[in-house]
Amino acid sequence: EPEVTQTPSHQVTQMGQEVILRCVPISNHLYFYWYRQILGQKVEFLVSFYNNEISEKSEIFDDQFSVERPDGSNFTLKIRSTKLEDSAMYFCASSDREPYGYTFGSGTRLTVV
Amino acid sequence: RKEVEQDPGPFNVPEGATVAFNCTYSNSASQSFFWYRQDCRKEPKLLMSVYSSGNEDGRFTAQLNRASQYISLLIRDSKLSDSATYLCVVNVQDDYKLSFGAGTTVTVRA
């Protein structure tokens, strides 16, 4: 079964540092997403990406965040200057026709110290 | 008011029992409804979509009540492997995002 691959599985970073979270969506999917889940809380939408541009973003997705699809396969989330409250599980997802057919990656656990 | 509200539980049930729980959503423009399952520290996985007429997938039955804006999930003949957090998920038409509830925890005991 096709899957969404995320790397790394766990990242520890110092406050103020930049991090890049990487995702390889399913190859024939057209819609790409980032969600996050702070420990013990609900899954929250960050951003959706379609046709090489952001299609929607949440209030959480401020100027510290950016997304990119640098080549035909990778989809990245960059946090420019991490804060303690950015500590969370970050899930990448892709779909062939939103909102159906969503597949989530196994997540990157980001710990900001 | 939260977009999607769920009873957090936990629901502790013996193997073989039936367990049911609901979720309510606030946006009447919501068009697509799903139940996802999440195991501890893992990604959400689609359990089933929820259709207006209600639908069944094996031991799982989902119902949608648009008038009252709630969705339900019923699990029959519970297995130990059904222990998980069940996430109610809603999408508004022409919107790209999914809105998640905080989840209902189910623990099935032997």
Image (spheres, helix red, strand yellow):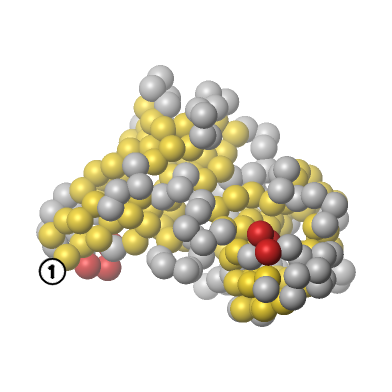
What residue appears at the point 47 percent right and 32 percent down from the top-left corner? B25
**A76 or B104, which lies in front?**
B104
Q: Position of residue B85 (x, y in %)?
A: 37, 57
Q: Is residue B41 above or below residue A11?
A: above
Whether residue B16 sits left or right of residue B59 in the image: it is: left
Whether residue A87 sits left or right of residue B4 in the image: it is: right
Q: Quadrant of residue A94?
A: bottom right
Q: Position of residue A84 (x, y in %)?
A: 68, 64
What residue appears at the point 71 percent right and 48 percent down from the top-left corner? A60
Whether residue A13 sits left or right of residue B103 in the image: it is: right
| Residue tagged 1 | B110
- For mark 1, give the secondary structure: loop
Q: Quadrant of residue A83?
A: bottom right
**A75 or A60, which lies in front?**
A60
**Residue type, mark 1 in image:** Ala
What residue appears at the point 62 percent right and 33 percent down from the top-left corner? B93
Whether residue A4 is visible to the viewer of this picture, yes or no, is: no
Q: Is residue B25 above or below residue B73?
A: above
Whether residue B40 is visible to the viewer of this picture, yes or no, is: yes
Crowding at mark 1 (Cα within 10 Å: few <14, some 14-19, many 20+): few
Whether residue A88 sits left or right of residue B22 in the image: it is: right
Q: Position of residue A61 (x, y in %)?
A: 75, 50
